[in-house]
Image (spheres, helix red, strand yellow):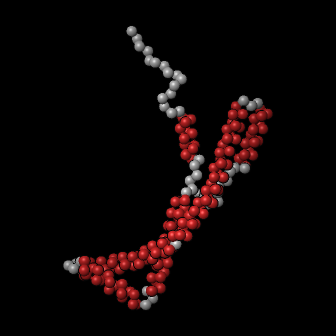
Amino acid sequence: MLISPISVQSYSFTASPDRKQDKNQVKNDKNPISKSGEKALLLKTTFLAGLGLGAKLLLELIDGDFLIDELGSKAEKIVEKQHKNASSSKKLLLTLGALGGLIAMFVGGFGILYTMFKAPKINYDGNVNAFKKGKDMDVYIQGNKAEKEIYTQMNEKAKTANDEEKAKLKEQYMQMQMAKNKLPDFIKQK
């Protein structure tokens, strides 16, 4: 007795390629602009500006030798307290490191204070930028959907068209290529 395999032609137990493609399509057509992303970008640039301002302020204060002597003596005290038995060359390197740490702490602290001071403006500007960019991106995405739909319809029509209709479709296709949906201004092209 020979057993033949069961043939199931009308049922599929895996997702069809079209369904997978539809899921990716929906994922790609979603607007990538978010309020949190815009706020994070503004927060980063504000913090970097605060660091620059802190460094400039520190350089203005260093004009007199008093601040350098004061920071140097603080760094020496930190090294002496933490590393009593270190050699003199090691203490010198540790003192330079502590001095760099004190400078970084001053500049970083000023950057944090500047960012905290600008936080309400960052929040407001982030919301405004996200709204503007979101609207531009929505227009771009909707334009792409419409363009895709037109190309699909042209392709379906071309399958059953005669030579004259194909020539007209080719002309329409060329016109569509000339009037391509352009990217929003805020997107940098490589």
| Horizontal relation, residue 122 to residue 3: left or right | right
Q: Residue furthest right?
A: 164
Q: Residue furthest left?
A: 85
Q: Quadrant of residue 10 in the image?
A: top right
Query: Which residue occupies the foreground of this view, 2 or 143?
Result: 143
Percent x, y of residue 187: 60, 58
Percent x, y of residue 145: 65, 45
Q: Is residue 131 above or below residue 90?
A: above
Query: Which residue occupies the foreground of this view, 84 or 12?
Result: 12
Q: Is residue 24 visible?
A: yes
Q: Quadrant of residue 174 in the image?
A: top right
Identify the residue at image location x=43%, y=90%.
64
The C terminus - image quarter: bottom right
Percent x, y of residue 105: 39, 76
The N terminus - image quarter: top left
Identify the residue at image location x=43%, y=74%.
108
Identify the residue at image location x=46%, y=83%.
59
| Horizontal relation, residue 102 to residue 37: left or right | left
Query: Which residue occupies the foreground of this view, 53 or 180?
Result: 53
Identify the residue at image location x=47%, y=85%.
60
